[in-house]
Image: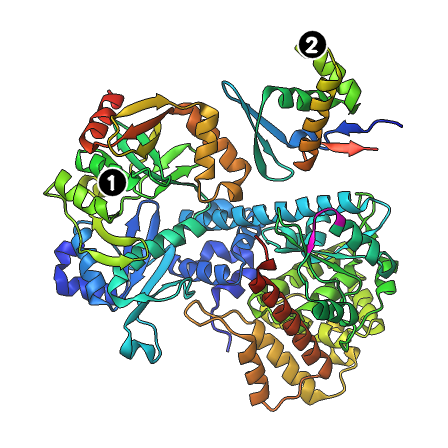
Amino acid sequence: MKADSWRIPFPDELLLEEWENAWMLYHRGTGETHLLDALTVEILDILRSNTLSTPTLAEELARRCQRSADAEWQARIGTTLERLEFLSLVERQR
Amino acid sequence: MSSPDPLLTVLREPGRMTLLSTAEWDRLLRMARAHRLLAKLGELARGEGIECRLPHRALDNIRAAQVWVDHFQLRIRRELREVRRAIGSPIPLVLLKGAAYMMAGLPPAAGRSFADLDLLVRFEDLQTVEQAMLETGWHSQVENEYDQRYYRQWMHEIPPLVHPLRGVEVDVHHNLLPSVGRFRPAAKALWERATPLESNGLFVLSPEDMVLHSAVHLVVSDELRGGLRDLFDIHQLYCHFFRRDRGFPAVLLERARSLGLAKPLFYVLQASHELLHTPYEAELLDYRNFGLRNPFQRVLMCHLVKEVLRPRPPEAAPPSFRRWLLYVRSHWIRMPPGLLLGHLTRKSVRRIRERVEEKGGGIP
Amino acid sequence: MTPDSLGEEGFLRQVRSGLTIRFGPFRICLRSPLLEAARVFRRLYPDIKLEKDEGIRDFHVEVFPPSGVRRWWRPQVEFRLDGEKPFEPFPRDHAFPLFEWGLNYAIATRAHNYCLLHSAVLEKNGRCLILPALPGSGKSTLCAALMLRGWRLFSDEFGILQPETGRMLPMPRAIPLKNRSIEVIRRFEPGALLGPLFPKTRKGDVAHLAPSRSSLERQGEEGKAGWIVFPRFVPGSSTLVSSVSGSEAFVRLSNNSFNYHLLGEIAFRALTDLVRESECHALRYSDLDEAVAMFDRMVG
């Protein structure tokens, strides 16, 4: 079975403001504002210019964070992506 | 007869905004707000390149209204995106009214807010679309089984759907008018001429059908408050389509006849011609082209539609549907059955909606 | 021309036919035949400059007894905004609170050319102190106390942020003190100019504190961002200040705004700039004098 891929349909719609320990994101597509942590911002940063499957994305993130892409990590990334999908920030491609 | 009504004056000739006194502006702003045309004034001024010549205080009020409009347009755009995601692209959708003006970039969209998202789907897709939306979190606004049946049997749309997190009402239609009404255009004919948008699977009605839909909706709707605004939509649509295609009046007339919508079109064209000075071609103002055989009815209907749509001064109370009916009755007029039916049907649906909202099934 | 200079008779006549006043960026036309409400207005705003009753008014407000038979056995008053009646009638005695409250409603639902924070705002040395209204903050009491100690009142209810310039706009009005804080402020400043007590309004007992004369005179002068302080009244607590992160201040301010969601990106940018330019703190207090002294130290 092929894994789902993820992408950001309109990257220009994301407006990020960095604060000392968090990020505020305004999403022009939905008109909503979100408070994000560092990992989520990394995910959005990578998906801005790539369409990636969950495992590939998890590996890239693990490399950036200098840790191993074990099952627990994969699951964590998967959950975050689903949350981002629920917020209409990323889109799933089957 | 024609009192210097500042709202009609600037809708006819937006350039006159620069000539108004501040007292006239005070009156204009209040009237425009009551008719939900405040942000529209800003768009008209921008179109004339005179925005910077308006009084500051007027601009402040207009900008405030524009913020409201932008927000509601964003809500509708977003809802459309969610609907498309929910049902997948192979099913074609025709956008109606506001969403159509907005996505097709037509003049009525500028400075106008839309509360609902109206869609037309093919009758055979209706169930698939409804099912997909219900599965993705939209709720039907009508829970009562009897009302549900009423909708499905008599109405041209399924009971409105609302996603509880977003609160936008989505009206999924399979035709433009109720199955019981006297005016009943064939949905197939509408699909044949629908214009595709760049975006895959999205359509809008053809220019002539768009004007017809807007006109018929205006005549059978009981939302008199929004009436002048809807009339101005028609004014702007007509001017836009005529600029693009000089043959548009003939196409519109021919289409109105073949869909059986000539009468309501005539009343609305008359009203917009008289109130807004829409520059219609002569063939569109000649009643003989519209199959109106009863002169008494024609003159009275034209008068009624026009008077109901005429903007009211700021100190007047808002008109009510009931008062209009009284007005009609007081003239011993029997409205054409189709028109009256249209009203009553809308009315009963509204009542159903209100009942639902009272039960707590409304927008959170 | 001011309500004071017109004399009572002249002023009442003016209110009956239409009175145009300026509150901050707004021009309001007020019409009312109710003598008592007009008298309270005159007592609380004796020095407000009256404008010519013409030109563009942002709000046309009428405070009138409703028509109908009820008026004979239960005197009531209703608020009309440009001919619309947004609320149920109030008891007749509460006409003045209804006017103030109704005007706030009108501003909050209409003035979307501004980013409207639900906050008290005061100014000193050109910089603004923003006190967001949160349950249990005691913001009105604090605001009243600061004004009585020389801070310039911008507003007890609205932080009016102009998104194009990032400036805060004043709109000094009478401060509605509720229940216990009426007595607290009387004790804090025995010379404070208070209006009559309105018992049992929707918000409890209410008495209005008049805006200071200098606040009204300088209501055209804008202010820059300065401090955002989230106050919390904790009985028996000492005065404690702690710092608040920018993101937290942003979230709390935006949640506490009247129209953040309507303005969308405009508000996101304006609030981001406002928070970045401000020092953000949380304050726990129980003693008003100590709290005021703390704010004065903060200004330096």
On screen, residue B354 above or below C188: below
**In-image side of C209 versus C164 (left or right):** left
Q: Magenta residues? A: B135-139
* The one of C58 and A42 positioned closer to us in this rendering: A42
Q: CA distance from mark 1 to mark 2?
A: 53 Å
Residue C141 has which mark? Answer: 1
Residue at the disc numbered 2: A67
Image position of B193 with respect to C116: above or below: below
Q: Is residue B37 left or right of residue B335?
A: left
- Secondary element under disc 1, as helix, strand or loop, is helix
Residue drawn 19% across and 39% down?
Answer: C214
Tell me what residue is drawn at x 14 percent, y 55 percent.
C4
Q: Residue at x 33, y 44 (%)?
A: C157
What quarter of the picture does the N terminus of chain C occupy?
bottom left
Q: Identify the image's colour scheme: rainbow, by chain, secondary structure or one colour.
A: rainbow
Q: Position of residue B234 (x, y in %)?
A: 67, 63
Farthest residue to the top: give it: A66
- The amino acid sitting under disc 2 is Arg
Mark 2, other Cα within 10 Å: few <14 / some 14–19 / many ≥20: few
Quarter where residue C204 is shown? bottom left
Does residue C127 appear anywhere in the picture? Answer: no
Label number found at residue B292? none
